[in-house]
Amino acid sequence: MVEDLYRLLRPKLELPSIKYPGRISIMRLGATSKEGGTRKRSIEIGGDIDFPFFTLEGPAAQRPAVAIEVFDKPVGVPKSIRESLGSATEDPIEWARKCARECPIDAVALRLISSDPQLDDTSSEECAHLVRLLLEEIDLPLIVFGSGNDQKDPVVLERVAKAAENERVLLSAATLKNDYKRIAHAALRYNHLVLSRTECDAPSQRILNNHLLELGLSSNQIVMDPTTAALGYGIEYSISMMEQLRLDALKGDKSVQMPIAAITSYTWNAREAWSDDEKLGPIEVRGPLWETHTAISLFLAGAGLFIMLHPVSVKQFRKILSEIFSKGAQSRQDG
């Protein structure tokens, strides 16, 4: 009876025809020799005019960019990743080199964790030197994170910005708690980009973005990080926040018309990603899947830049994206 009713009604899915007045700014990460830098290639992030796969006009979605994260000191690196990369995790340059050689990545994200005053308190000069070495050894675009210390990060990022002048590095991160003005001025002076990070709060994201715009940065020099929560650990909040920011941007809110970053390396804080508990399944499979699932969910919510930690996660994410885009293109042709 139900099947007969279904045939009678012949339901058909039709996407709503909505043309938004706004669009996401296009940010270019990295600079080639023609652009004043030394990268082999630069990458574009943004340019979206709708939510992913929610339109029949134009591209179904912009392909996201993927970066692999490396630490300058292997503190807190999950066992699964240490086993996957071996001794490479002891040397950030070798770590980056190995991943660039074996993974389909667009950029490298260096986390200067040792600069934390509570750890090694590595000087800004030493951090800048490491960045210069990494730029010489790896020809991919670069993202640089501080340690997360509100007092130290602006000092470190300012020095890094000078050492990497004109390479269009993404400096991470400006927050409402640190000296974001110092980071923004360094980005302007030395031709870089800024990651604008808030704690899952749209009003705070607008406030910080507006501060950065008022300081002289353009919307295509800013990437938003509204906080990445892991699968099972508040991911629904990240999804909701990213969707809200994307929708407001498409409706014309210029304060949030910037690409969104998802730092899925944070998912390894979830116990299920690193626990040796055999009841949860083999860790070598479970950990990367935990990060990959988080990445796919946030891509559909609007994120365009992914900073990942496990090489297997990167490969899985890229494979799923290839299948999604190829099937989506075929469906649109058939339609």
Image (tube, rainbow, N blue to C red):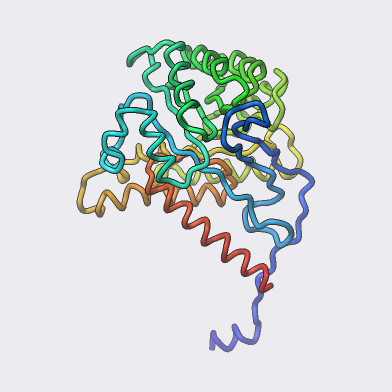
Q: Closer to the camera, 36 or 243? A: 36
Q: Is residue 19 visible?
A: yes
Instruction: Please give the name of the residue rendered at 65% of the width and 70% of the height, measured from the top-left corner.
Output: 13
How many numbered marks, from 0 up?
A: 0
Q: Is residue 165 left or right of residue 120?
A: right
Q: Is residue 227 left or right of residue 49?
A: left
Q: Is residue 196 visible?
A: no
Q: Is residue 37 left or right of residue 78?
A: right
Q: Position of residue 280 (x, y in %)?
A: 25, 52
Instruction: Please give the name of the residue rendered at 40% of the width and 48% of the height, measured from the top-left corner.
Output: 313
Location of residue 219 (image quadrant): top right
Looking at the image, is 331 positioned above or below residue 52?
below
Looking at the image, is 255 positioned above or below residue 305?
above
Q: Position of residue 207 (x, y in %)?
A: 65, 25
Instruction: Please give the name of the residue rendered at 63% of the width and 38% of the height, measured from the top-left corner.
Output: 259
Location of residue 88 (image quadrant): top left
Location of residue 270 (image quadrant): top left
Quadrant location of the C terminus in the rendered image: bottom right
Q: Closer to the camera, 128 or 56? A: 128
Looking at the image, is 132 positioned above or below residue 66?
above
Q: Closer to the camera, 332 or 108? A: 108
Quadrant location of the N terminus in the rendered image: bottom right
Instruction: Please give the name of the residue rendered at 52% of the width and 55% of the height, measured from the top-left corner.
Output: 321
